[in-house]
Every structure is written in structure tokens, then in C-alpha cells.
Amino acid sequence: GLLIGFLILLLLIPISMIGEVIWEREEARNKAVSEVTSSWGGDQSFVGPWITVPYLQHRTESQTTGSRGESFTRTETKYATFLPETLSITGSSASHIRHRGIFKVPLYTLSLQVSGLFSKPDFSAWGTNSDDILWDQAFLTLGVSDSKGITEQALLDWNGDELGFRPGAGGSTVGIAGIHVPLDGLLEDETFDFSFPLTLNGSDFVYFTPFSRETNVELTSDWPDPSFKGNWLPASHSVSQEGFKAKWSIPFLGRNYPQQWKSDSGFSGAIDGSRFGVKFLVPIDNYRMGHRSVKYAALFLLLSFVTLWLFEILSGIRIHPLQYLLLGAGMCVFYLLELSLAEHIGFIPAYIIASSAIVSLIAVYSAVVLNSRKKAVIVGLITAGLYGYLYILLQSQDYALLIGSI
């Protein structure tokens, strides 16, 4: 018994080395993903649009010169932010797979149609003098976290006028990267209907923010494995092998920032916390499965060695410790074979091939060690049962603790 325990501890050394190999391969995969998304487009967070209007703020300050005190007026340019009254976003995404070496990188192209309504920016609540409002410097900003993913020129329809977006956020103090449109001479009406299309390349996530009194988002995609994330789940959704469809309807009462604020209000954290959207989930992550498989290595070694030890006790056949060690070494190879095959043919076929190979290896070797085909078949069936159990455990993530306990 002590010898079996020592051999298991000894075999945990190559198991830990295989675990390090899994980490290294996962890091190589992540680097490949980063290289592809850096030129295609990364996680996309869609914020806005909103109107920014600069204004002059006058502040009286005093300065002491010698024994006399003097006062003077300091004028600074500040910015006021105004959100739309209504916002509707309809989008559809098409999935793509790009290859970097042996690694597959899932990407998407998102086509959006954005529309809504703004009211004329109102400074009356702040008591700002109308002469201090710089209407000619006002602009509309659309926040896009990774603007290099914009693939087509975006045109804004503003009360019937067609305006082209420009790079950058336009000096907005919301603290979000994006694109903007100057609104010089275009804020004279009381309300403003707007709409524009936007095509974005991205990967992994797409997020939206509830930037109006009533925000409605409808998203369809051909990706069959969505994971809805963020501060709100969809009001309704459907998922099938052909893709998913989700709808959000969010009132402004559920967020922690108002419809308008000044530049020094500091709502960037609240805006970031109000995001909602979807992660384009990869259904089977080979490296996550590899890490989970290795966690059960000690249990598999123990059960296999105990099986051989029982045959040794019951049949009187002596098994050399080196034979235990060779058998355990074969079981260690399973995890390496599973990983290397999964990178090329996927996890499920890789698991079937790797487990079949190891079960055959152990059965044939046991036939020689135990000098009995019947006993070798029993050892092979027990080993096959163990790998079948492991597969069920890996596939049933929600019930892994229950299955493992049983």
C-alpha cells in the first residue's frame, strides 16, 4: 500500500509537467487570438450616441498682492452631456473563423441600425447664461471601444440632413473612445430625429449601454452558443443550432446616471457598470477540458493500481513496482495525447481516440503482466469505465460536483 502511494506521488511529477504544457499551449492560443483580433477588432462596447455642448464657466478668484487683495474672473470651457429621449438598436452578426497556425479564432461582423430622438439641450436647470453656451461647437459622439473594427463610412441622418462621422470622440469628457459629428447650426429645432447604420468587426463580446429614457436593442446572430452578460438579461431570447435572437428593453430608472450632466460629474464608472450584451461562447474549450481532466489524474492512478493490487493479492501473481510505474506512465500519456489531438480534430474525437489507445495499451500490457487474457479484459473494462466516467464528468459541468461526490 505504501509502495502504491509512493508510485502515485512519483507519477504526479509528469502529470504536473503535462499541466504546465497545457498552460503553455493555452497561452500560445491566447497570443494567436490577440494577434488576429488586434488587426480585426476586439471586444466591442457600443455607447451612445450623446450630444456634448461646450459652455463658459466664470469663476471669481481673489489674489493677495502685498497688503492689498485683488479679485479677478477666471473663464473656463466646460462640457455638458445630453442623452437621447429614445434609442433603438437593431443588429445582426455574422460569424467568421480565422486561422493562426493550428489555432482557430472566432470573430464576428456586426451590422447595426441605430435610430432615436433627441430633445434640444436644456441648460435652464443649471442657470447657465445663454450667451455662455457655445452652440457652434456642439457635437454628437458615438462610443466604440475598438474603432479600428469600423469597416464602412458611417453617415448620420439628422432631421433629414446627412452628416459624415469623423474619427475620435471630439473632445468628449465621458472618457470613451469613438467617433463624432459636429452639430454647428443644427441644434435650432426642439427635437431631432437621428438614424445611422454602423458595421463593426469584433470578437468575443459585444456590449451596449442604456443611453436613453427607453433603450431597445434587438440582436440576431448565427452563433449557436451565446452567453448573455452584463447588468441586464434579455427580456426575451431564443437559441437554436442556427443561431440566437435576443431583445432588451431597458428604462433609464434602472441605471445610476441621469439624462444630462456636466463634465465634472464623474459618471464614467456608472456608465461602464450599466453595460449589457452577449459573449460569443466557444462551446468546448480544449484547454479548459485539459485542465479539468488532469485534476482527476491521481484518482485514476489510484483506482487502476488498486485494481492490479487486488489481482495480485487474490491470484498470488507478483507484479513488480516497475510494472506499476510503466502502467501509470501510459496513463499519464493520455492527457498529452488528448491535448495534442484536440488542437487538430476537436475535443470529442480526440478524447475517444486517446482513451481508446490507452485502454488498449493497458489491456494488452495487463495480459502480459497478469498472464491471463480474462483478467486483462477485466482491467481494460474497468479502465474504459473510468474514462467513460471522466467524459461524463467533463461534459456535465453543472453537475460535476454531484457526479464527483457520487
Image (cartoon, rainbow, N blue to C red):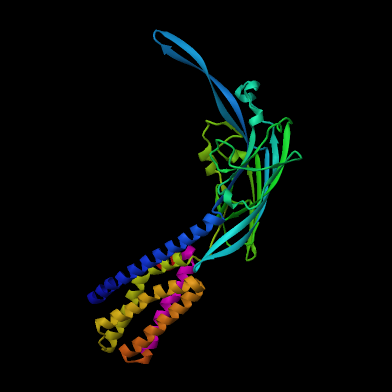
In the shown orientation, is residue 236 left or right of residue 36?
Answer: right
- In the rendered structure, which segment of residues is drawn in magenta? 375-399
The quarter of the displayed image where residue 12 is located: bottom left
Percent from the top left, x then y, of residue 196?
70, 46
Percent from the top left, x then y, of residue 301?
33, 75
Q: Residue at x 35, y 86 (%)?
A: 365
Residue 57 belongs to magenta span: no
Q: Residue at x 37, y 91 (%)?
A: 373
Q: Which residue is drawn at 34% across and 76% down?
A: 303
Residue 396 belongs to magenta span: yes
Q: In this picture, is 41 found above or below 363? A: above
Percent from the top left, x then y, of residue 76?
54, 24
Q: How many marks?
A: 0
The quarter of the displayed image where residue 333 is located: bottom left
Q: Residue at x 38, y 84 (%)?
A: 361
Percent from the top left, x then y, of residue 113?
69, 49
In this view, the residue in front, 11 or 32, is 32
Q: Which quarter shows the C terminus?
A: bottom left
Query: Secondary structure of the magenta portion, mostly?
Result: helix
In this view, the residue in front, 390 or 338, is 338
Q: Which quarter shows the N terminus?
A: bottom left
In the picture as drawn, the residue positioned furthest to the left comes out as: 2
The quarter of the displayed image where residue 158 is located: top right
In the picture as drawn, the residue positioned furthest to the right comes out as: 160
**Is residue 295 shown to the viewer in this render?**
no
In the picture as drawn, the residue positioned furthest to the top comes out as: 67
**Is residue 187 shown to the viewer in this render?**
yes
